[in-house]
Amino acid sequence: MADVSILETFDVERGAFETAGEASATIKRTLKRLGVDVGILRRVAVATYEVELNLIIHSLGGRLELAVDENWVRVTSRDRGPGIPDIDKAMTEGYSTAPEDVRTLGFGAGMGLPNMKRNADDFSIASEVGVGTTICMGFKLR
Amino acid sequence: MTLKDLMDKTGMRLLTPDAPLQREVTTGYSCDLLSWVLAHGQAGMAWITVQTHLNVIAVAMLMDMACVIIPEGITLEEATLQKAEEEGVPVFASDKTAYELSGLMFALGVGQAERT
């Protein structure tokens, strides 16, 4: 892949299930155009969709950011709250605070954060109650 | 096995008429918990689910699945079909149950993916 540096941002609103996946799909298309390997592409798409869903289900709204350089694809999610009181608990597979209507759709099984971590080569999460949550995911290109 | 072969041999109906059917189906899967599918689904899968909302198409497209199969004659929401057409995700319908379809597909040689 040629030396490129791109940056795209996407606003994601709380409760926007009708458009869930659009930001992830756009990111996937951008990376495909750049010639990113299909295996990496798929991991980025899944992890980004998980974080996009989290913004829709759990946050008060936020923003996804895509940054690409010659070595890494980085996807960052920043929201406006409410923040996660216990990150260790939130990272535990099977633990979820998703409401019933979200579970009816087949989401909210408490697998999102662990799945992001599994798909990314680099994962970090920071959160402050009343302020917001930031999730950074990195995917190695070489 | 291609999507066309799978359709012919299982008697499924194609709901997205413009979808190309020459793609190879590598594995099969049956699950209605989308969170679970996001963790265990794989590229090339034929995925059977009773869920019919828009997000099914997003999952199939983002995971690069071969197709979505809606069992038991369940009606798909119009918006979901439209999304499937837009994203190029083949969607099939069958009157058979997910259980029967899975058995049939397995017998036809569509195996299960390695567990991830």
Image (cartoon, coloured by chain):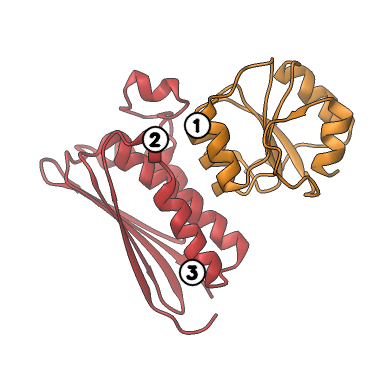
The CA distance from mark 1 to mark 2 is 10 Å
Chain displayed in red: A
Question: Closer to the camera, A62 or A85?
Answer: A62
Q: Earlier in the sequence, mark 2 or mark 3?
A: 2
Q: Position of residue A125 (x, y in %)?
A: 29, 52
Q: To which chain does the residue with label 2 belong?
A: A
Amino acid type, callout 1: Ala
Looking at the rendered image, the disc whose residue lies closer to the viewer, 2 or 3, is 2
Residues at circles 3 and 1 in contact by the CB criterion of under 8 Å: no
At 70% from the left edge and 43% from the top edge, which residue is drawn? Answer: B18
Q: Are marks 3 and 1 on the same chain?
A: no
Farthest residue to the bottom: give it.
Answer: A3
* Quadrant in the picture for residue A8: bottom left
Question: Is residue A93 something one can see in this rendering?
Answer: yes
Looking at the rendered image, the disc whose residue lies closer to the viewer, 1 or 2, is 1
**Residue behind mark 1:** B79
Q: To which chain does the residue with label 1 belong?
A: B
**For mark 3, does the 10 Å Cα neighbourhood hold few (<14), some (14 to 19), or many (20 or more) residues?**
few
Q: In the image, which disc is placed on residue A18?
A: 2
The colour assigned to chain B within the rendered structure:
orange
**For mark 2, does the 10 Å Cα neighbourhood hold few (<14), some (14 to 19), or many (20 or more) residues?**
few
Q: Is residue A7 left or right of residue B26?
A: left
Q: In the image, which disc is placed on residue A140?
A: 3
Question: Is residue B34 something one can see in this rendering?
Answer: no
- What SS does tag 2 mark? helix
- The quadrant of the picture occupied by the C terminus of chain B is top right
Q: Position of residue A64 (x, y in %)?
A: 31, 55
**For mark 1, does the 10 Å Cα neighbourhood hold few (<14), some (14 to 19), or many (20 or more) residues?**
few
- What SS does tag 3 mark? strand
Amino acid type, callout 2: Glu
Q: Is residue B32 above or below residue A17?
A: above
Farthest residue to the left: give it.
Answer: A130
